Image (tube, grey):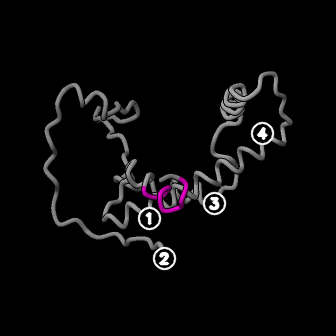
Amino acid sequence: MARTKQTARKSTGAKVPRKHIGSKQAHKQTPVSSSSSGGVKKVHRYRPGTVALREIRKYQKSTDLLIRKLPFQRLVREIAQEFKTDLRFQSAAIGALQEASEAYLVGLFEDTNLCAIHAKRVTIMPKDIHLARRIRGERS
């Protein structure tokens, strides 16, 4: 479905302003210094889900790695220490491990999302991950 712009409509009447609690009012509104009326400007908030959809489009366009390199490298070295001490890694080897790990995780989350949708939910849960891995044959 193509994204389209909505046309502007005339308002039928003025909205009645809501009453704010004093502590929340300080967080939600910032004073406007250039305004001569001395009013307060409301902080702009996007509707729920708008920013999430924007992030989805952003990450679907990009091909760069999603996990930071140094934390991943530390994790790989920590796991390798359990098998053999004083191991050395080429940078290309850690890069290949990271590419493979991220590809695996993205695929697992795709299958997990399908499991959640099958259960008529939009939120993924640990049981969806367990089911996806069970169907794949990775875990009994």
Q: Answer with the quarter of the image where residue 71 lies.
A: top right
Instruction: Please say if the residues under marks 3 and 1 sit with CB atoms less than 8 Å apart.
Output: no
1 or 4: tag closer to the N-terminus: 4
Please give the range of residues in magenta: 131-138
Tag 1: amino acid: Leu
3 or 1: tag closer to the N-terminus: 3
Q: Residues within 10 Å of mark 3 (few under 14, many from 20)?
A: few
98 with respect to 116 (left or right): right
3 or 2: tag closer to the N-terminus: 2
Q: Position of residue 38 (x, y in %)?
A: 29, 32
Instruction: Please tell me which residue is depicted at 55% across the width and 60% down the height of the picture.
Output: 57
Mark 3 and mark 2: Cα distance apart in space: 17 Å
Mark 1 and mark 4: Cα distance apart in space: 30 Å
Residue identified by numbered label 1: 114
SS for dot 3: helix
SS for dot 1: helix
Tag 4: amino acid: Ile
